[in-house]
Amino acid sequence: MAEINVIKTKIDGLVIIEPSVFGDHRGYFMETYNKNDMAEAGLTMEFVQDNQSASTKGVLRGLHFQKTRPQGKLVHVSLGSVFDVAVDIRPGSPSFGQWYGVELTQDNQWQLWVPPGLAHGFVVTSEYAHFHYKCTEYYCPQDEGAIRWNDPDLGVVWPVECPVLSQKDAVAPSWREFQASLGTR
């Protein structure tokens, strides 16, 4: 059984996972998911869907979430690098409105566990990146939400000034609009 190292972040439940990577002159091998190892580390999520995206440098996807069917996501990069961000949007959480960012790369092979109730996004920092994520809930287009990637009230420090955005992300609601939709301010 391979060992994993779990690193806590300032946001409750959001953790970096350092898997064991076995390399030699041929390349490397790693387990990207092992239910027993995760359970031993206190992570007992069940996945229902796997996704993969390929993007070029400067593409920013996020900050996304599902409103009533929140997804937990186990994310990692197999090619290239991204700056990955999670924002706590759980009302009543001590870290509500806080964000955390980490660089995920093909070299460090880190994974990020983004628990349900967090908005998530990433920007590609290499020429090209393959981004993978396992989800605890099915994607539901009618349930999706977004928060503006560069909202000044959130203050996420992205390593890009003019990212490539989808139309949906370009017009995403502000943090204040999101809070108003919850009835909190």
Image (tube, helix red, strand yellow):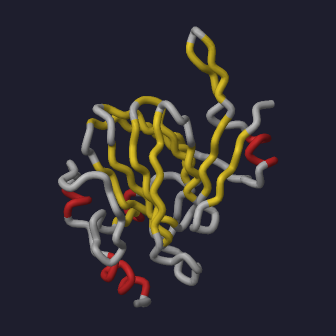
* Residue 79 position in % (x across, y down): 42, 29
* Residue 44 position in % (x across, y down): 73, 53
Please determine whether, in this image, residue 132 is positioned above or below residue 79: below
Give the quarter of the figure containing the N terminus.
Answer: top right
- Give the left or right position of residue 81, taking residue 24 as reference: left
Give the quarter of the figure containing the C terminus.
Answer: bottom left
Please determine whether, in this image, residue 155 is positioned above or below residue 113: below
* Residue 46 position in % (x across, y down): 67, 50
Residue at the image point whose x is 26% and y is 38% from the top: 57
Quadrant for residue 30, please give it. Answer: top right
Q: Residue furthest top?
A: 26
Residue at the image point whose x is 51% and y is 77% from the top: 96
* Residue 69 position in % (x across, y down): 52, 64
Q: Nearer the viewer, residue 10 or 88?
A: 10
Please determine whether, in this image, residue 182 is positioned above or below residue 155: below
Residue at the image point whose x is 43% and y is 38% from the top: 131
| Total count of labels | 0
Quadrant for residue 170, please give it. Answer: bottom left
Residue at the image point whose x is 21% and y is 55% from the top: 161
